[in-house]
Image (cartoon, grey):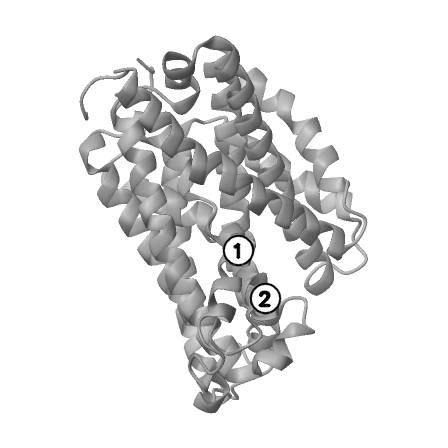
Amino acid sequence: MNGSQGKLTTTQAVVIIVNYMLGAGILTLPRTTSKAVGTPDVWISIMLSGLIITGIGIIMVTLCRRFPGKTVFQFTREITGNWIAYILGFAMIMYFTVIAAFEVRVMADVTGMYLLERTPTWAIVMVFMWIGIYMISGGLGVIVRVFEIILPITIIIFVIEILLSNQLFEIGNLRPVLGDGFMPVFKGLKPSLLSYTGYEVMLIMTAYMKNPKKSNKAMSWGIFISTTIYLITVVMVIGSLSVDGIKTRTWPTLDLVRSFEIQGLIFERFESLLLVIWIMQIFSTTAITHYCASVGIRDLFRTKKIKGIMYGLLPFIYLTAMLPKTVDDTFALGDMLGNTSVFLFAILPLVLLLISLIRKKGGKHA
């Protein structure tokens, strides 16, 4: 049993999923999916991805509920035996560590480009990492409370900004619907997967829920809210900038917000406001993945001292974040993470669930 058992309500679990999901993807999703799809049907790809991820997420929490109060790093040992559990656990820890590094690097690149010009990347990365360690060292309760403050602010400001861009919106940019059939839609599924990474946090958080029976509900709502925000973003960006106009832009969502101004308001240019809330959002993803990696090491090697582990991970996150030399290298790292997440969190939980059923491991649903 974990010492922190019973801290999370269902709503807090939803908040964690949404905060994790809405990371760097929102800034790049319109470009990566538009490039893959090549037609205005990107929004259909986003909806299908959301449905697929919901199905995968429900399989995942079904697996977790067979082992009440245990994280994936603890119950994998019961299903597969020690050696395989160590290999899989280590792979997941590496994944969470690299995601933390990727998100902090994207945050540094965007901040350096738009807000803190000529500031060295390493300086931005270090500042965010130290703020992150200060928060996560307070434990899950502190993380959730901060997330509960960040999420409503993010959603309100984001929706207002995107809807204000309707002066540039042209419905013709979203037509024709399925002009080239369904094949382009399917091509858009893979690039959207990285943007949906975040549901895997429930492999750990289900163990800390007051009512694990509601983990299905938490997963479904978390993915639904994220999908809705992604959908609004993609429709507004493509409707305003067109598919061809997006493909050449590095950060199309920011370009959309930069392309209009409203006279007479306190803010006439909105990209700084959007950047501020998205820096908070990417910070959330970095923090929760750093925390998950630390929990993984603690549970896999059965130690108690999680704070030492958190500090020990800092150099690894920093060095990984500094590896990409260009923005393209950063995106290549993101693609690699998307491919890894398919294996680790789409295929693996189903395999583990089947093995646990066959070998009769784990109790009934919590």
Whether tag 2 and tag 1 are in contact, CB under 8 A, the answer is yes
> Horizontal and vertical percent for residue 297?
53, 18
Q: Is 61 located above or below residue 35 in the figure?
A: above
Quarter of the image with the N terminus is top left
Q: Dot 1: what SS?
A: helix
> Horizontal and vertical percent for residue 290?
54, 32
Query: Which amino acid type is marked by label 2?
Result: Ala
Q: Dot 2: what SS?
A: helix
Q: Is 278 located above or below residue 202 in the figure?
A: below
Quarter of the image with the C terminus is top left
Q: Going 55% across and 57% down the picture, which residue do you hit? A: 191
- Residue 353 visible? The answer is yes
Q: Going 42% across and 51% down the picture, which residue do you hit? A: 150
Query: Which amino acid type is marked by label 1?
Result: Lys
- Residue 141 visible? The answer is no
- Residue 267 marker: none
24 to the left or right of 108: left
Determine which quarter of the picture holds residue 275: bottom right
Q: Which residue is mark 2?
A: 36
> Horizontal and vertical percent for residue 146?
41, 42
Q: Nearer the viewer, residue 83 or 164?
A: 83
Mark with earlier residue (2, 1): 2
Q: Is 129 located above or below residue 120 in the figure?
A: above
Q: Is 212 located above or below residue 252 in the figure?
A: above
Local packing at callout 1 (Cα closer than 10 Å; few below 14, some 14-19, many 20+) is: some
Q: Which residue is mark 1?
A: 190
210 to the left or right of 113: left
Q: Going 63% across and 67% down the picture, which residue do you hit? A: 251
> Horizontal and vertical percent for residue 208?
31, 26
